[in-house]
Image (spheres, rainbow, N blue to C red):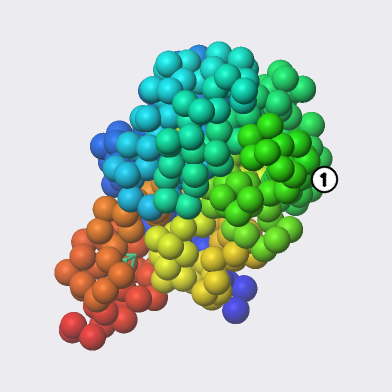
Amino acid sequence: MARASSVDRLERLRGRLEDLCLRTDFRGRIENDPVAVPRRFTDPLDIEIAAWLASALAYGRVPLFRRALDRIFDAMGGRPHAYVSAFKPERDLDALRPLYYRLNTGEDIACLIYLIGRVIERHGSVGAAFASHYREEDEDVGPALDRFVAGVLDIDATPIYGRRGTPRGLSQLLSRPSKGSACKRLNLFLRWMVRPDDGLDFGLWKAIPPSKLVIPLDTHVLRISRYLGLTRRRSAGWTTAAEITAALRRIDPKDPLRFDFPICHLGISGACPIGKEPAKCERCALRSVCLKGGKLLAARR
Ligand code: SF4
């Protein structure tokens, strides 16, 4: 009986999430999303680098990090791959020093560019580097991401900082699942690179199956996932991101992150506010499977 009701709940959740996808204005919402930045480029090698940089700075308000990214791409002459491949600290670092974005100094940004250059030098592309760490038997991309970031942090950054070690601003750009971080921005980068090109993501890294991705866990995704009963956890760490993804994988085993953008933008757009606004729940595709919406609407009747 209990199994029948959990299957029934799963089916209802699937139906509501499909409806949410249908109602989401993907094209319109992309302009309010960091993915609009790599979408400006057409060459896969440029897209890969633009996507890594854009996802790395994708925290805080969208207009603010978009402005910071514009300055970085201007400094690159609009050709990220050519710039990163030819980047020389002794020649190019000073021009990047005045750039900064919230927790990241110009040196942190220059260091990420320098490290991406070393990755490309060794592997040919960022995708090839990531694929070299991926193992089919891994449950999700977590172990590969951890090995990948460890490899990047192993590169000597002395030419940028003038000393060994990992400054806080660089650690903030290169988080690791093994440290408990949800790695929201790196998981966003992976989603863009791995999920099929559907006008939103790019599908460039064919060696990684979309089924192994882990959700880029931000505050909107966390709270709405809690409303939907996908997790009971409050902390925004790796375990929570993996748990929410496992729940979405039961709904779509091949492409669980298909629901990430619609859920996230339900929050970003204000259609699902943090406060109590039953009028918005009334119009919401998820209202019949939402614990919070259910309570708000019941209290109204
Ligand atoms: S029903 Fe209400 S609380 Fe639930 S997801 Fe929709 S808008 Fe948010």
Is residue 35 in view?
no
Q: Quadrant of the C terminus?
A: bottom left
Instruction: Return the x and y of residue 91 as percentages of the image width and height.
Output: 58, 19
At a point 59% along the width and 39% down the height, the residue shown is: 190
Mark 1, Cα crowd under 10 Å, few <14 / some 14-19 / many 20+, is few
Amino acid beneath label 1: Glu
Is 4 left, or right, of 55 in this rendering?
A: right
Towards the viewer: 290 or 92: 92
In the depicted structure, whether residue 160 falls above or below residue 144: above
Is 247 left, or right, of 42 in this rendering?
A: right
Tag 1 residue: 137
Q: Quadrant of the N terminus?
A: bottom right
At a point 32% along the width and 36% down the height, the residue shown is: 67
Q: Quadrant of residue 199?
A: top left
Q: Quadrant of residue 24?
A: top left
In the depicted structure, whether residue 200 falls above or below residue 8: above
In the depicted structure, whether residue 102 falls above or below residue 274: above
Towards the viewer: 5 or 146: 146
Towards the viewer: 192 or 228: 192
Instruction: Return the x and y of residue 201 as percentages of the image width and height.
Output: 48, 33
